[in-house]
Amino acid sequence: MSTTGASSVLLFILNILHVVFGLAIACASIWFFVEVHSVTSLRNTNHYLLDYNVYWPQAIPWVFILVGVFVICVSCCGFVGAKKRSNGLVVMYIAFEVTAIVALVAAAVVALTFADTKSTDKFIEDAIWDVYTTMKNDRNLETSFGNMEKRLQCCGASGPRDYKNWRDSFPVSCCDTYYHGWIGSYNIDCDFTNKLANERHGCTEVATNYTRIIIRVLSGACVFTAFIGLMNVIVAVTLSKSMKRRPRPMPVQLESESKKVLL
């Protein structure tokens, strides 16, 4: 196989990996945004009528989403260039890929510098405490907060003790409502003596830890995707040089032109 053919195949394979990681970053970022919005949407809106600030836990998912979508678009350009073996398309792909690498590294640096900080913890904690305080007098909000407790496997805002001042027992969301085993399912009492509920962490602690983990995982994914993009650039440059060295086909001489030369 020629250098051009081998480089085209390798570029095609690397772009498949690039698309997979770009799609994973975009999908994980969308999920991250939905999870943050599911908490912030429950806050008391009267407390935030004059708050027009955009906080990093709300903004950083969009940064990752845009970077992931851009990586997918650049990879599509790489697929076309590798298939058509067009030097112009390959050069354009190299320029876009370098831009994508810079964007990926910048997104990771911004996330780790500005989003992975104590200010993010404080934002999440304030949001959950606001929801917890408001839901004491709002039955619908209590159900939504209970769904969050089930999803995060947490209990209360700071811990299970939060409920002991104003309830007779833990909400069922602090316990496993049903146990599924060989004998079937049955209800579990969720009173203040329930061991499972008392051992659970508060939702502020769980949510802040999950937020930090997600930011770091997405940042690491961006750096790894940038490394794959760097390999794409190296292979694309090799492909471009091999296409430049490829000899041009000799023009076909027609029979009538041969006769004119002989005459």
Image (cartoon, rainbow, N blue to C red):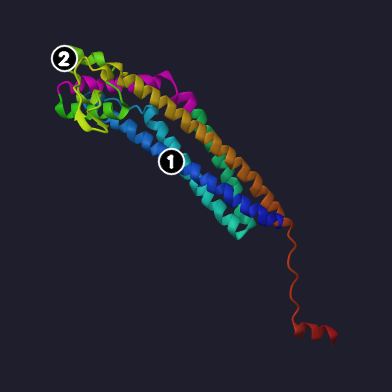
Residue 237 is situated, as x and y percent measured from the top left of the image, at 67, 48
In this picture, is 222 found above or below 116?
below
Pick whichever, 110 or 168, lies toward us. Answer: 168
Q: Secondary structure at mark 1?
A: helix
Instruction: Report, in whole angstroms, how far the alpha carbon at label 1 lies from the one at label 2.
Output: 42 Å
261 left or right of 79 in image? right
The residue sitting at 47% across, 33% down in the picture is 218
| Badge 2: residue crowd in 10 Å (few <14, some 14–19, many ≥20) | few
Residue 184 is situated, as x and y percent measured from the top left of the image, at 23, 34
Give the main secondary structure, helix, strand or loop, of the magenta stretch.
helix
In this picture, is 65 found above or below 261?
above
Asked if the stretch drawn in magenta spans residue 164, the answer is no
Residue 129 is situated, as x and y percent measured from the top left of the image, at 27, 19
Name the kind of residue labelled 2 in the image.
Answer: Trp
Pick whichever, 181 or 196, lies toward us. Answer: 181
**Number of the front mark, 1 or 2:** 2
Q: Is residue 91 visible?
A: no
Res. 26 mark: 1
Residue 69 is situated, as x and y percent measured from the top left of the image, at 46, 44
Number of numbered discs visible in the structure rendering: 2
Q: Quadrant of residue 3?
A: bottom right
In this picture, is 205 found above or below 86?
above
Q: Earlier in the sequence, mark 1 or mark 2?
A: 1
The residue sitting at 74% across, 75% down in the picture is 252
**Quadrant that contains the C terminus:** bottom right
Which residue appears farthest toward the right when viewing the image?
262
| Badge 1: residue crowd in 10 Å (few <14, some 14–19, many ≥20) | many
The residue sitting at 24% across, 23% down in the picture is 174
| Span colored in magenta | 111-137
In the picture of the structure, the residue carrying the numbered disc 2 is: 166
Q: Is residue 29 visible?
A: yes
Name the kind of residue labelled 1 in the image.
Answer: Ala
